[in-house]
Every structure is written in structure tokens, then in C-alpha cells.
Amino acid sequence: MISKSTYLRQLTESTVLMRSAPFTKEIAGSSPPSVFIGSWNYPDVYAGPLVTPEHGNTSIMDSPESWIPENKTQEEILGYRLSLIRGKQRVHACELKGRFIEKLQDISLSESSVESDVVFSSTPTGSMFSEEHIPFGPSAPLEQFEIETGRWNRDLEKVFYDTDLKASEAVTNLHRNGLLFSSIQKAFSTGTMGSGNKRRLVPTRWSITACDTTIGDHLLSRVKKFPVIDTWRVHEFSSLHNNYAVILMPTGWQYEWSEAFLHVLNNEELVFSDHEGSKKKTEYSPLGGCYYTCKMAVLEALAREQKQAGAIILREALHGYVPMGVFNVRENVRNAMQQPAKEFEDIKSALTHISQKFTLPVTRFIESGELLRDTIRMRQCTLRDFA
């Protein structure tokens, strides 16, 4: 069977995507604020700002937490992202001294959009789509890069100057204080957290999963101390050509993430699944960052309610879906967990309800998901019960 990474590579290469507007070699505008650190050839990476020709408040272009609550369409989100031009300069991840890195840190710590003047050594071209990070428009090497230093976020500034605070503690403290995940991740990626001599630039895609994992692990240590829910619950949400169903089980913590891609490229119906028991996975999930960001979003809601549960999450991506980064999963699952739960007496009735909403038969998820299959077997159900 094709792997998820191979399939998504085909999807990003084959899907007809919106084209960004043409840009010149000189741009005066603002950064939302936003930066991007590449992962190729780490620790020698390409880093730089994301800048749009628009002036003033451009924060909506890099505020994934607001897009779904504000009912932004996929086309609107892609329009925002393809208007951002990436400037890049090769740097070493361990070398944080120098004005260039200081400017990137200024941007990532900023409270609001940062006015920027950029000159590229060539005309920006192309675009970047990924299942891990949010897409952006053309890119080109930087020749000149100047910003107007703005006001830093107070919580991020405090962490920046605390060189005795571990990066993991900084991330969890900022999350507990209510800072947006996207703000935490950007500051983390530019080496503004951790013990002074251990600070590094962290590639954007790695920093997203690192923050999801750090927050998730911290939340799980709390959730395991809470009482277990006493019924089966289903939280549902649909947006951006995706359907989500979060099944909460009256058990101790265990977790499974299953995602289906239906007729996105052609006539394919692919299901990918991974799970863990009460103990954390030791190897990196083959499903990538989506596995960790979904886990964090569910634990976030359980911690807020001060309850413990097992969780099986089903997702189906439908025709029209475009890979736009793990924010798509995180924010959809967050919104699902904010919807009133429907309660059921058993797993059979919960899945029967979901089957009326989903396009793919739930039997396909059962066949793919080991935890879901074991849960059904323990309740003395069979696939025939869901046919």
C-alpha cells in the first residue's frame, strides 16, 4: 500500500493550485509577522521573513487560529498565503549572532505586523505547499532586508530574556498563559527559547511538531490524573473539504488517528491510521505532524474539562482538499471539541451515527484502525454490524 508521505507528495505535485500574483525584485510592505526556516541540509538552512506588498495590519495572513472561526474559505486562505513572499538567506542553525538573525527574532516576537523593505537578488518564483506547514508564495534569495522594529509580545519577551528557562518549560508556560500556538511556534523556531548556549534555529516544520508534542505531553500528564468520562461521546465538525469525528471512550487514555483521502486526486480511497496505548509512542508516527497536532488538540479539551478518556479520531478529506499544513487538523479538531457532544451507550451506536454523516463506510476505518478494531472486538461486535 502507498505510504501517506508518498501520496501527499503526489497530491502536492498534481493538484491544480491557485497561482500567486507576479512580484518584482523590490518589495515594500509588511510581515504579518511571519518567518520561515527551511529544513533542507540542516544545520545549514535557508531562513528568512515572509513579506507581503500590503502595508499595515496583515496579521490575518498568518493567523490560522482565526480562519475557521471566521469562516474563511479555502480559496481565501490560499489567497492570503500566496500573497506572502519568502526571502531566504543561508545560515547555520547554531549561529544566532548577527543582525540578520536578530531581525528574524524581532519579527517572531512582535506583537503586530512589521513594516519591511526587501530587495531580492532575483525575481521571486514558485510556491510551497506541504501537509506539515502552511503554504506560501514565491521565494528568492535576499539581497537587502530592513524592518521597522515593533513592540514585542510581553510573554515572548520575558521568555527571550530568561536564558535559564528550558525551551519545553517556555512552550508550556506560554500555552498555559493563552498565547496563540502559531505565535509560540514562530518564536520557538527562531531560537528565542531555552538555555542560552542551547538555543538554535529550528526548521519550521520541525518546530510545529516539537511544540505540539511538548504541549501534548504536558497536558497528558495532567489528564491522566482526572476521572474517566462515564459515557461514549462524539464531537463532530466539518470545514475546508474535511469531515471530522472525535470519539471519546469511557476508558483511560489511549489514542488513534485515522484519516481517509477520498477522490482528491482521482478515484482513490486511501485510509491511514496510527495509534498508541497509555504509553507514549517512542518512534515518529508515519502519519507525520497530523498525528501529534490532533493528539494535542484533544488533550487540550480534556484538560479544560478536567476529564480523562480514550480518543479515536476519524477524518476524511474530500474532493477539493488541498494540503495546507497541520493547522488544518489542529484547528478543525479544536473546533470539533468545542461543539456539544452527542452521547451514546456503546461504540456501535456511536459509529452508526457517524456512518450517517461520513462519505466513507465506517468499515474502512475499522479495517485500518487497530485500536478501533480491538475496541469493537472487546464489545463483541463484528464488521457485519456496521455493513
Image: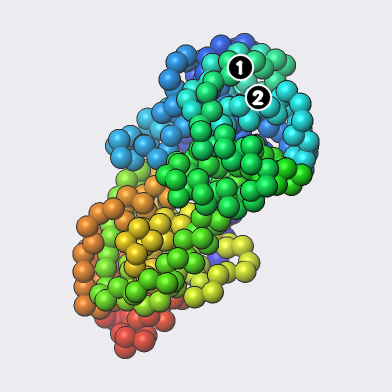
- Residue drawn at (44%, 27%) of the image: 59
The vertical placement of 33 against 330, above or below, is: above
Residue 1 image point, x, y percent = 55, 65
- CA gap between label 1 and label 2 equals 7 Å
Task: Note whether residue 284 is visible.
Answer: yes
Q: Residue at x 62, y 37 (%)?
A: 160
Q: Is residue 355 left or right of residue 47?
A: left
Mark identifier at residue 293? none
- Residue 37 in percent (x, y) is at 65, 36
Q: Can you see residue 386?
A: no
Residue 223 in the figure: left or right of residue 8: left
Query: Badge 1 is on which residue?
Result: 147
Question: Which residue lies under the disc numbered 2?
Answer: 103
Residue 50, relative to residue 347: is it above or below?
above
Q: How many marks?
A: 2
The answer to whether residue 31 is above or below residue 210 is: above
